[in-house]
Amino acid sequence: MPAIRILVVDDSVVIRKVLCDALASDPAVEVAGTASDGRLALAKIGQLKPDLITLDVEMPNMSGLETIREIRKLHPKLPIIMFSTLTEHGAATTLDALALGASDYVTKPSNTGSLDVTMLRIKEDLLPKIKALCGRGLADKKLVVPPAQRPPLAGVAERAKASVEILAIGTSTGGPNALADLIPAIPANFPVPIVIVQHMPPLFTRLLAERLDKVSAISVHEGEHGKKIEPGHAWIAPGDYHMTLDRRAAGVHLSMNQEAPENSCRPAVDVLFRSVAAMFGANTLAVVLTGMGSDGVLGSQAIRKRGGRIYVQDEATSVVWGMPGQTAAAGFADSIFPLRQIAGEIDRYVRASRQAATGKPIGVR
């Protein structure tokens, strides 16, 4: 199989060298060329025919955002990974880049104190994303769940009697845009709270929550330790913290911790889903959206074992069909939907389950 051809675009000679050296260390990847700004990159795409572009956010002559706009006019499907700084400005610009059509992002290592550590961080963060976005099947190690450990599909009648009391969502690569499609489609009178894990570092999760809040009928917040969850509100796990649930006399509250990463992630979907399963059991509806890797598979297993229901995003509308695809392959998905259908299916099922449990109609859109 031919190597994945990469065009590296960055105005810094040092960063270009570090990136090229990191990429060259993997035999599955080939640096097809480099460019110091967006204009040069656009001229080289036709010549080099790269499989993927790494693109700096801040560049002279033509910024990363301007470059994305021009690339998408001629190459709507060409994968683009942004290389951004872990700052407030860098996070905001990266979210803008994703909205414009960037496929994913990697944050530049800072304060590592060593070139070797910087190289290792870049290789660990960047190479799996390149392989996943180029569809080589090299990035996602399949999480095999033995058939004996898979929750049976029997008991559908009993599960149908459960009234949904919470919606849990897990996502990674492609998630910000998927959430930007799904969350604004949730109506203001949605009758249960929503908890979300999106794989993102600090700053990014807060800005994502703020952006979603501005365009949604429900209120969207970054998760806060001790906050009581309520219907009509959604909480996104803060970067670098696992988010779980804690039942108190006054209701169910959020809890944050910095225990070891799971699936190389903190926050991790599995952590949240296990907590939701333990707290709400069969009264859970969970959704696994686009994402690289297998985070969410074992959490979905925990929810299914307790009688909850799992929806996953389909392959055609996923940027990477890792998390949802592996959840489906493990036998834990009740239904698979295109992204634009998911909000409607969530709302319909939640209201129907609650009406069936109470015998009283629940307001619909």
Image: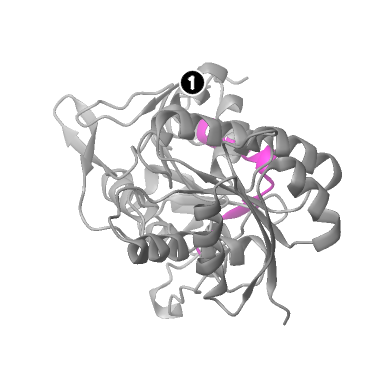
At a point 55% along the width and 68% down the height, the residue shown is 23
Position above or below: 269 against 1:
above
- Give the x, y percent position of residue 185: 61, 26
- Give the x, y percent position of residue 193: 39, 29
Question: Which secondary structure class fits the magenta region best?
Answer: helix
247 sits left or right of 338 in the view = left
Work out whether residue 71 or residue 8 is closer to the camera in this orientation and state it: 8
**Quadrant of the image for the C terminus?**
top right
- Give the x, y percent position of residue 268: 36, 52
Label 1's element?
helix
Q: Amino acid at mark 1?
A: Asp
User: Which residue is under mark 1?
Assistant: 213
Magenta segment: 331-352
At a point 73% along the width and 54% down the height, the residue shown is 316
Tell whether position 341 is magenta: yes
Q: In this view, which residue lies farthest toward the left? A: 249
Position above or below: 208 against 189:
below
Work out whether residue 127 or residue 298 is closer to the camera in this orientation and state it: 127
347 sits left or right of 197 in the view = right
- Give the x, y percent position of residue 6: 67, 63
Position above or below: 213 against 319:
above
**Quadrant of the image for the N terminus?**
bottom right
